[in-house]
Amino acid sequence: MSDADAIVTLIPRLRRYARALCAERVAADDLVQDTLERAWSKFHLYRRGTDLRAWLFTVMHNVHVNQVRAARPAAPLDEGLPELAQPARELDGLVLRDLDGAIRGLSPDQREVLLLVALEDMSYDEAAGALGIPIGTVMSRLARAREKLRGVLSGLPPGGGKQLKVVK
């Protein structure tokens, strides 16, 4: 399989991860396109024999971080509009919306690790390599992300309802 064919087979995974990182489909498609463009122009930096998937996810991560840093904060257009009522038969859609909202409520660092490990099925070592962080950091961010998701989805107040122990 040629390098171009190998990259083409990974595009669906790149699109899925980009869609999870970006709130909009168009932004996700732009991120994938920017990633592929950067990867192709920098392919001479890829070391043969290493994991191409992890390398492409690293490129995507770096492109996304650069885009977020360059973006100027703007108020969403629908901020003042009320939410439309959802029919009760769309319970699955509501659950997915709640999960998506809970994931978006995570810090970017926690969200990236959670998506790479849970959605993209990367090992801790692969995620650490893709993000350029130690494996212990991956594990702690993932644990914090999972704990926060559990709390949000179970309806617990911030902090998980845990009370601090008073020490005298």
Image: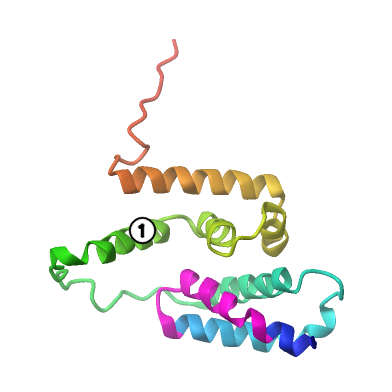
Taking the image as drawn, is residue 68 in sight? no
Which quadrant of the structure image shows residue 40? Answer: bottom right
Relative to residue 12, is residue 112 depicted above or below? above
What residue is drawn where x is 29% and y is 59%?
Answer: 95
Residue bounds of the magenta highlight: 8-26
Horizontal and vertical percent position of residue 132: 71, 60
What residue is drawn where x is 58% and y is 75%?
Answer: 13
Location of the N terminus (image quadrant): bottom right
In this view, which residue lies farthest toward the top? 168
Horizontal and vertical percent position of residue 12: 57, 80
Question: Horizontal placement of 54 versus 45: left or right?
Answer: left
Residue position marked by numbered label 1 in the rendering:
99
Question: Horizontal placement of 26 versus 85: left or right?
Answer: right
Question: Horizontal placement of 68 versus 37: left or right?
Answer: left
Question: Horizontal placement of 43 versus 84: left or right?
Answer: right
Looking at the picture, which amino acid does disc 1 mark?
Leu
Q: Colour scheme used in the picture?
A: rainbow
Foreground pick, 38 / 25: 25
Horizontal and vertical percent position of residue 121: 60, 60
Relative to residue 167, is residue 73 depicted above or below? below
